[in-house]
Image (cartoon, grey):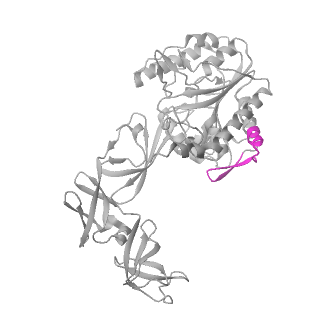
Amino acid sequence: MIEDEHKRLIRLKSNLRRRALIYEFIRVFFREQDFLEVETPLRVPNIAPELHITPFESEAWFLSTSPELHMKRMLAAGYDKLFQISHCFRRGERGRWHNPEFTMLEWYRIGADYRQMIQDIEQLVVTVTSKLGLSTIVKHRGQNVDLSLPWPKVTVRDAFLHAAGWDPVVEHDSLRFDTDLVTKVLPNFILDRPTVLMDYPAAMASLACLKPGETRVAERAEVFIGGLELANVYSELRDAGEQENRFLQAIEQISKEHGQQIAMPQKFLEAVANLPECGGAALGIDRLVMLLCDVDSIDEVIAFTVDTA
Amino acid sequence: MDIEDVRKNVKLLIDGILYNADEAEFMKPGKGRAIYRLKLRNLLDGSTVDRTYHSGEKVEEAHTTNREEQYLYKEGEHYIFMDTETFEQYFINEAQLGNRKNFLKEGMVVVMLMMGEKPIDITLPTFVELKVIESGAATKTGTVTPQMKAATLETGYTVGVPAFVEKGDIIKVDTRTGAYVERISTKK
């Protein structure tokens, strides 16, 4: 049964008010640290080729799947601390925690690595929570989650060895990785604390650099709270040749598996060559709002989803 | 159908067995592939099983229909129903009905889930009205709580009722919980 629109919007009002406050506190958090808020295009000629992220086409262009490429082009030109709150579009992603159009908070810091970006996330979440007048122990889905710092960290290798009985750093099986992550590893995380999953296998580095001294893994981490994937961080890859190779592989796989032709983002590759050492983070704002409103569905924090628009 | 299109309560035919998707969860690590987790309920025996699917996989949708059917009578293990439009008769086994047999009264109209010409499952009305054929005194061992006593209904089902309910009364029962709701009429 489809809920009456008037009733739905009235019911969502308190969550949407809190959502607006969260935006306000996020902006204060970054401005106080001299970050510049920027806007990059939502309709773009190129996206980062990634096998499991499918774009919507818009005439010959795409709706942005992430603001990453444009923000890094600004970093390469000399901007040092940037943040953006932008809508991203990913085709086919719909479920209790997904809407094909969602809101991403993305930020970059020159001179930082993924560890510092994790600290940024910790500070940001704790600051926003406290400004909302909530205690560091928040209730989510009937479970108390203690947000006090620092958050527990575990490597992908240890988490998989413990919960799934194999080492994805040594064995390469991306299908098994994705399945076991969702069905075994995440359900095994402690429920009353956030978990930071560190050091993804090199094959899943995406746009992150490899770890110096242990190149089988990348300096990439993901933050999970209450079973929700909240944020993704990288020490950003600065080797344009390596980045081009990764993209070429992804372009080939996308063409083979989905029959879709994705062009190489040339302007971005030129920028990578000039990228200073930096870290980046992307945080799903809808998920953060879900956590801080204690709701279990993305439909409770968005006024109009793909099903109600 | 594509696994992407499976929603809650879609009926699926997997290895020849009819299932209801009690839950259909879309899960996707940000950079990883989409995983679809279904909680499937076997519509014949009620057992449940979890299955995991990936993008691009297909499942067979069962073509089921809902029809209004009237319960006629019981014959051995079979409960006989009749389609109210076509007058075709169908039966369902006692085991398939489970506790719901406690609320079936001759002449009652239910919604029958059919796959082709095969009856699969019935949905009872939320409330049914049944006659009390026996009710003990409030002090008997059949007392359910201090204020309630046991009463046997025309279907053979025993339910806790307030002390004022007597043999011959018609009472309303909630078929979801099996509990007494209210007295509808008293014995004339």
- The vertical placement of B83 against B131, above or below, is above
- The vertical placement of B178 against A17, above or below, is below
Q: From which residue to which does the magenta span run?
A: A126-146
On whether residue A132 falls in the magenta region, the answer is yes
Rendering coords of residue A105 (x, y %): 65, 29
Q: Residue at x 36, y 63 (%)?
A: B124
Image quarter of the N terminus of chain B: top left
Say if residue A223 shows up in the picture: yes
- In the depicted view, which residue is nearer to us: B111 or A4? A4
Rendering coords of residue A100 (x, y %): 51, 32
Q: Residue at x 76, y 38 (%)?
A: A127
**Left or right of B129, for residue A70:** right
- Locate residue A116: give its quadrant: top right
Say if residue A164 shows up in the picture: no
On whether residue A152 falls in the magenta region, the answer is no
Image quarter of the C terminus of chain B: bottom left
Numbered circles on residues, count: 0
Q: Residue at x 70, y 11 (%)?
A: A77
- In the depicted view, which residue is nearer to us: B177 or A16? A16
**Left or right of A184, for residue A219:** right
- In the depicted view, which residue is nearer to us: A282 or A158? A282
Rendering coords of residue A115 (x, y %): 72, 30
- Locate residue A197: give its quadrant: top right
Q: Residue at x 75, y 40 (%)?
A: A126
- In the depicted view, which residue is nearer to us: B122 or B164? B164
